[in-house]
């Protein structure tokens, strides 16, 4: 039986305005091939901005 979370990777979400990494989340690398994009609150900009997936974390 496969280990739970075997295909999930950690990714950082970066604000497109100020380029700060504000959030860390996971995604399934097999089912989700494109990069994640969310509308999230940026504490540095103090408004809701788009956050895009940046890189894999360890």
Image (spheres, helix red, strand yellow):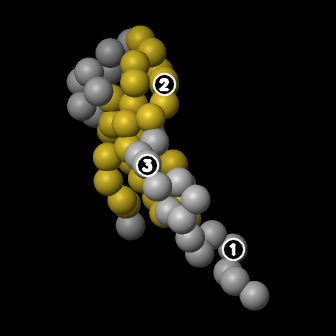
Which residue is tagged 1? 4
Q: In which quarter of the image is the N terminus?
A: bottom right
Which dot marks residue 34?
3
- First reached walking from the N terminus: tag 1 or tag 3: 1
Q: What element carries label 2?
A: strand
Q: In this view, does 10 lie above or below 23?
A: below
- First reached walking from the N terminus: tag 3 or tag 2: 3
- First reached walking from the N terminus: tag 1 or tag 2: 1
Horizontally, residue 29 falls left or right of residue 3, namely left
Hey, which residue is sitting farthest left in the picture? 18
Q: Is mark 3 on a helix, strand or loop?
A: loop
Residue 26 seen in the figure: no
Q: Which residue is drawn at 54% across and 65% down?
A: 30
Q: Residues within 10 Å of mark 3 (few under 14, many from 20)?
A: few
Q: Quadrant of the C terminus?
A: bottom left
The Cα atoms of the two marked residues, 3 and 2, are separated by: 18 Å
Q: In this view, does 18 lie above or below 6?
A: above
Q: How crowded is mark 1: few (under 14 residues within 10 Å), some or many (20 or more)?
A: few
Nearest to the observer: residue 37 or residue 12? 37
Horizontally, residue 40 falls left or right of residue 19, namely right
Hey, which residue is sitting farthest bottom in the picture? 1
- Camera-near label (3 vs 2) is 3
- Camera-near label (1 vs 3) is 3
Q: Is residue 41 above or below residue 4?
A: above
> Which picture quadrant has residue 44?
top left
Q: Which residue is drawn at 48% across and 24% down?
A: 39
Which residue is tagged 2? 40
Horizontally, residue 38 falls left or right of residue 50, namely right
The Cα atoms of the two marked residues, 1 and 3, are separated by: 22 Å
Residue 53 seen in the figure: yes
């Amino acid at each position: 039986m496969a280990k739970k979370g075997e295909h999930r990777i950690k990714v950082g979400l970066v604000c497109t305005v100020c380029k700060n990494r504000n959030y860390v989340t996971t995604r399934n690398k097999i089912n989700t091939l494109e990069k994640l994009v969310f509308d999230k609150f940026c504490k540095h900009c103090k408004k809701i901005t788009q956050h895009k997936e940046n890189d894999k974390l360890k």
